[in-house]
């Protein structure tokens, strides 16, 4: 008889035990049965979820808030946060997989990844998860390096069956004790056993009236689950299931078999596997604090701290433990979204606003004397080259990029003399930091992950304007004087650019100010809402930035984007066949044939589809690349420019402001708001171009 079989019989206990306590004296007592997952709905409606003993050390109602404030859980998707071969944090939520087990000290779950949702919304393994898989390697990395893993439990978890206070609840640090493979459907996937690091205190998620955990003296730290060597592959596997021992090496032909047959569908863990514990070991440590105290590390007296990358991370509210993002220019406010009042039962009063000592230009500008006398004349030949005009707008250098039949972009290049003039860009940069402009980060209306905030601060003065987000808008009568000065410069630039293009000039009635801290940016977008006039002018202040302009995906490819990007989306109804788009000549010829009645609409569409067959759509290359320096002005002109093209701006250093003036068509605005857009510039706010 093979020892493998003998082992499986010898270790089959009398009765299955699903969960257990940890002391020697009571470890073999059967535990109270929990509500089965299929009865969870009933339990919920009958309010049967059991109350927990304590409260989590940090929590949030949104995934984004959690990831922003907890450095060991920075992934907005998936269950595991891992980086460079180590797992730092793990989320236990819905979809933990079969044979998931949770008690006050031990958690057994599958390791996410390689999954797809079936028609009923259950996660199934799409492909085998192998030992080489990055997330399997990461969890092994943490186990082998004695790196503790932080666990978070989500309220969608159906196994613990307790009344969790929030959507996401930080549990505690755990050590990884075992990683093994199971057969899941037709595939194999990895499972992990976590054991709580600190065994001396009762877990906050323990039952409200449960006993205190066993003392160290009472605990059995010696017993370990038995392990046996496979006769075929010679690898050792633990005895995990009451139903019998199995080889757990997915590469072995005997993998996942009891006595040469598939195991029963229902498997239960042995008491030894659930109940064994490790003696406290000071060398098993986490990389971060469970609840970081970021605020204590930010020295408010250092001018460059409050706008640094680390200073726009989230914090854990010291009063109510909620994870809060830096939504405000000056700091954090616990009551920054609607969920808070409901969750805490009352508004949490905590707020932390930084003193925001002004950042000097010297810190953000690299140039020897802040700005050159004459700007560099080098242009990268990979991108469109502008027309250069050094005289018409002197002392500005005017660069004009024309996109035929679409529009133009005029770049007024500033210099040291312009910037340092009284009330010029140098003064504006300092003053805008001193004024309380009311800058805030807003939720993106369409983003891959719900609740994503813009990675820049914004405030809108004048006529209400909704760009990629819905911004609060204030009337020009509330605007600081410096904003009106900026508006004077922007009106000057717009008027000159539009008149040179031979078009009618409409004075701007709206000013959107964006503020960027270190590593903030604005991704590709257009400013082409139907409510806007054709000209958009921006004044750059502070750190240098790169502005990129490219054709939009659908005009470049001739069809809309599909989420999977594997097939082609909806064909353009009216394809403008822009210069340099994909298959430009073929698309142009087909369009002509349709126009001349030589082919039907169906033939036109199928020929266009055939062009892209077997090819994935791709992003258009960047056509225009501009370096925006402190004091520069850019005017984008032409409705089609916003329709067919998109732009993105990324500053290269900390602290930059972009003040953008637009004309909002009054017919798109509630007449009661008209007066917000009214202003008249004082003589010294009107700009003369010097
Ligand atoms: O930061 C910039 O220069 C551009 C800002 C922008 O594109 C916008 O406000 O829509
Ligand atoms: Fe824009």
Image: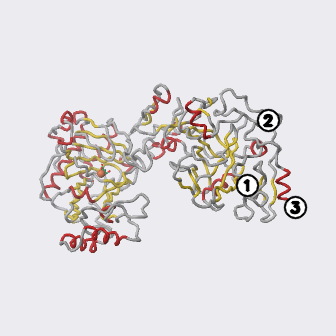
Residue 661 visible to the viewer: yes
Q: Is the CB–ligand 2 distance for label 1 below 8 Å?
A: no
Where does label 1 land, which residue?
263
Q: Is the CB–ligand 1 distance for label 2 below 8 Å?
A: no
* Residue at screen point 31% across, 67% down: 383
Q: Quadrant of the N terminus?
A: bottom right
The reply to whether dot 3 and dot 2 touch (C-beta < 8 Å) is no
User: Dot 2 lies on which element?
Assistant: loop
User: Dot 3 lies on which element?
Assistant: loop
Where does label 3 land, which residue?
1
Neighbourhood count class around disc 3 (C-alpha, 10 Å): few under 14, some 14–19, many 20 upward: few
Mark 1 and mark 3: span between their CA atoms? Answer: 19 Å
Say above or below: 437 vs 286.
above
Where does label 2 land, which residue?
29
Closest to the observer: 455 or 577? 577
Q: Is the CB–ligand 1 distance for label 3 below 8 Å?
A: no
């Amino acid at each position: 008889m093979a020892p493998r079989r003998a082992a499986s019989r010898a270790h089959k206990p009398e009765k299955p035990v699903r969960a257990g306590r940890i002391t020697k004296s009571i470890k073999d007592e059967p535990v109270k049965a929990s509500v089965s997952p299929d009865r969870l709905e009933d339990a919920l409606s009958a309010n049967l979820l059991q109350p927990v003993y304590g409260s989590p050390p940090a929590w949030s109602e949104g995934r984004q808030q959690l990831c922003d404030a907890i450095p060991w859980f920075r992934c907005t998707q998936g269950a595991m946060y891992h980086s460079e071969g180590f797992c730092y944090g793990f989320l236990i939520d819905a979809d933990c997989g079969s044979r998931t087990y949770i008690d006050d000290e031990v958690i057994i779950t599958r390791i996410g990844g390689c999954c797809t949702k079936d028609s009923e919304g259950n996660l199934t393994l799409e492909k085998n998860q192998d030992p080489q898989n990055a997330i399997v390697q990461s969890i092994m990395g943490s186990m082998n390096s004695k790196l503790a893993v932080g666990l978070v439990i989500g309220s969608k978890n159906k196994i613990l069956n307790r009344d969790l206070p929030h959507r996401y609840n930080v549990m505690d640090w755990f050590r990884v004790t075992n990683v093994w493979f199971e057969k899941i459907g037709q595939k194999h996937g990895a499972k992990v056993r976590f054991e709580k690091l600190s065994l001396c205190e009762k877990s906050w998620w323990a039952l409200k009236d449960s006993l205190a955990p066993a003392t160290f003296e009472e605990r059995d730290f010696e017993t370990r689950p038995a392990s046996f060597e496979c006769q075929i592959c010679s690898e050792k596997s633990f005895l995990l299931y009451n139903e019998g021992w199995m080889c757990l090496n997915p590469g072995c032909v005997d993998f996942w078999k009891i006595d040469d047959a598939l195991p029963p569908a229902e498997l239960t863990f042995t008491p030894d596997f659930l109940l064994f514990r490790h003696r406290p070991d000071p060398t098993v440590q986490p990389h971060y604090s469970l609840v970081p105290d970021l605020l204590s590390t930010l020295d408010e007296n250092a001018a460059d701290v409050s706008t640094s990358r680390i200073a726009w991370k989230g914090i854990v509210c010291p009063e109510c433990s909620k994870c809060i993002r830096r939504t405000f220019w000056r700091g954090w406010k616990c009551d920054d979204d609607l969920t808070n009042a409901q969750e805490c039962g009352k508004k949490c009063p905590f707020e932390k606003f930084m003193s925001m000592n002004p950042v000097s230009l010297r810190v953000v500008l690299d140039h020897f004397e802040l700005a050159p006398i004459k700007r560099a004349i080098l242009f990268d030949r990979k991108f469109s080259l502008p027309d250069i005009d050094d005289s018409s707008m002197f002392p500005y250098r005017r660069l004009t990029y024309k996109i035929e039949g679409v529009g133009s972009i005029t770049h007024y290049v500033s210099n040291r003399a312009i910037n340092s003039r009284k009330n010029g860009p140098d003064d504006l940069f300092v003053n805008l930091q001193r004024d309380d402009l009311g800058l805030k980060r807003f939720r993106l209306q369409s983003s891959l992950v719900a609740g994503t905030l813009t990675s820049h601060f914004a405030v809108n003065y004048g006529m209400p304007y909704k760009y990629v987000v819905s911004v609060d808008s204030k009337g020009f009568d509330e605007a600081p004087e410096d904003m009106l000065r900026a508006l004077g410069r922007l009106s000057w630039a717009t008027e000159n650019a539009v008149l040179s293009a031979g078009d009618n000039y409409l004075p701007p009635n709206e000013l959107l100010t964006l503020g960027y801290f270190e590593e903030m940016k604005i991704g590709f977008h257009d400013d082409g809402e139907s409510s806007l006039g054709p000209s958009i002018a921006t004044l750059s202040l502070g750190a240098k930035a790169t502005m990129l302009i490219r054709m939009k995906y659908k005009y470049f490819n001739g069809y809309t984007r599909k989420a999977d990007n594997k097939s082609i989306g909806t064909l353009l109804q009216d394809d403008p066949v822009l210069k340099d788009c994909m298959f430009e000549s073929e698309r142009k010829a087909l369009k002509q044939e349709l126009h001349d009645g030589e082919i039907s609409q169906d033939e036109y569409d199928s020929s266009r589809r055939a062009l892209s067959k077997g090819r994935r759509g791709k992003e258009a290359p960047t056509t225009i690349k501009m370096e925006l320096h402190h004091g520069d002005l850019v005017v984008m002109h032409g409705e089609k420019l916003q329709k067919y093209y998109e732009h993105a701006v990324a500053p290269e250093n900390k602290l930059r402001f972009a003040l953008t003036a637009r004309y909002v068509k009054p017919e798109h605005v509630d007449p009661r708001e008209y007066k917000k857009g009214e202003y008249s510039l004082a003589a010294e706010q009107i700009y003369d171009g010097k």
